[in-house]
Amino acid sequence: MKYVCQVCGFIYDPEVGDPDNGVAPGTPFEELPEDWVCPVCGASKDMFEPAE
């Protein structure tokens, strides 16, 4: 499932991950480190909601 940042609209796609920030492709949102932040705006994980 994809998650969208409620601040800037960035979509976290587990199939892509966030390799620029050390998150391998295939990493589910729930397994992201607690200190992971939105790579676009810096919002914390709690600012993300499941994408419709």
Image (cartoon, rainbow, N blue to C red):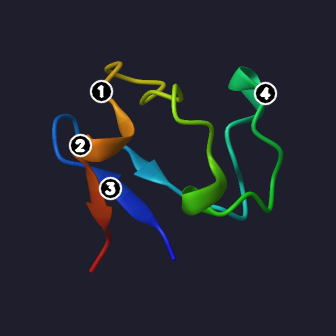
| Residue neighbourhood size for the residue with mark 2, other residues' Cα within 10 Å, grouped as few (<14), some (14–19), many (≥20) | some
Q: Is residue 4 left or right of residue 18?
A: left
Q: Is residue 35 left or right of residue 31?
A: left
User: Relative to 48, is 13 above or below?
Assistant: below
Corner quadrant of residue 19: top right
Identify the residue shown where x is 45% and y is 27%. Answer: 37
| Residue neighbourhood size for the residue with mark 1, other residues' Cα within 10 Å, grouped as few (<14), some (14–19), many (≥20) | some
* Disc nearer the start of the sequence (3/1): 3
* Disc nearer the start of the sequence (4/3): 3
Query: The residue tagged with tag 3: helix, strand or loop?
Result: strand
What kind of residue is marked 3? Val
Look at the numbered discs 2 and 1 and tell me whether their residues touch, using CB distance below 8 Å: yes
Please tell me the numbered disc located at residue 22. Answer: 4
User: Which residue is identified by label 2?
Assistant: 47
C-alpha separation, residue under disc 1 versus residue under disc 4: 17 Å
Q: Position of residue 18 (x, y in %)?
A: 67, 38
